[in-house]
Amino acid sequence: KLADVVLGYDSPKDYMNDTTYFGALVGRVANRIGGAKYTYEGVTYKLVPNEGKNILHGGPKGFSTVIWEVDQFYPKAPSPYIRFSYFSKDGEEGFPGNLKVKVAYKIVEGNHLSVSMTAKALDKATPVNLAQHTYWNLGGHNSGNILANDVQIFGSQITPVDDELIPTGKFEKVQRTPYDFLKSHAVGSKINELPKGYDINYVLDISKKTGPLNRVAIVKDKKSGRVMELWANKPGVQFYTSNLLKHEKGKGGAVYGPHAALALETQGFPDAVNHPNFPSVMVSPCEHYKHHMLYKFSTTS
């Protein structure tokens, strides 16, 4: 049985007015930067805040709100493919330097989705941390909440946050905490031990044996039998259980509420520009940023 497993809207206009980031590519820097500022090589850059005093997903005019150009489109190819591009100008939302960005979506092997993001800094060093903000519900976008979904996340640590969801700069082990998904179990089994739900960055356990991509997470919907396995080349993944969704009108008249879906946003660590102990997200002039995700879909009896 087939189903639409991604939350979204019916019309482009709804996406233009969206506040949920449904299906969005977010950037120039995904997630949060504390105080909407950072200092690099002695220069402090002030960004445009859009979540209190902080900046979230690139600011009020992040990459999720701009119009992208279609570079290539091969809908009838053996592996259907589309590529978009965007030119982010120096100073956009306070970020320095001109930046060329591309994202390609490709169906491979019939039931796998490849998402490839690249960016090139043209003239100034700039932070770049792009993420794919898809809301997944393997039971179907209108099938209710995802609390019964089994999830496994291959990350033994998290980057804990303060009351404004800004990382403290520390690392904490997930074992014997509600954040422990090292073994697959239901999302809802420990969610009530958290104030609102899951919205945290996991430090992925990187293995050099698996090649350029590492296994990030596995999601199983026991009712439908659908399985999604995520692989990527970034050090972190934000696990989010759509805690803030409330009476959101979506596709086909569906109304999405809290925990109607889950997001697994592979990324550099949040607020990395303000934590020297985090992997750097800075891209120097003429350097290339590359972020590749592979979503493998299957079924189980």
Image (cartoon, rainbow, N blue to C red):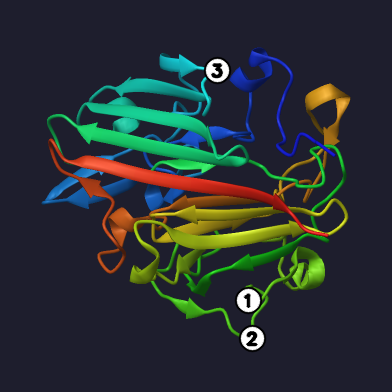
The residue depicted at 63 percent of the width and 76 percent of the height is 180
The residue depicted at 53 percent of the width and 26 percent of the height is 78
The residue depicted at 31 percent of the width and 26 percent of the height is 92
Evaluate if marks 2 and 1 touch, with contact meaning CB atoms under 8 Å apart.
yes
The residue depicted at 68 percent of the width and 19 percent of the height is 14
User: Which mark is in front, 1 or 3?
Assistant: 3
User: Which mark is in front, 3 or 2?
Assistant: 3
Image quadrant where residue 240 sits: bottom right
Distance Cα–Cα, label 3 vs label 2: 47 Å
Picture layout, residue 168 above or below residue 183: above
Evaluate if marks 3 and 2 touch, with contact meaning CB atoms under 8 Å apart.
no
Q: State the mark number for residue 176.
A: 2
Q: Is residue 37 left or right of residue 286?
A: right
Q: State the mark number for residue 180.
A: 1
Residue bearing the label numbered 3: 75
Q: State the mark number for residue 96.
A: none
One can see residue 61 in this view:
yes
Q: Amino acid at mark 3?
A: Pro
Tag 3: Cα neighbours inside 10 Å, few (<14), some, or many (≥20)?
Answer: few
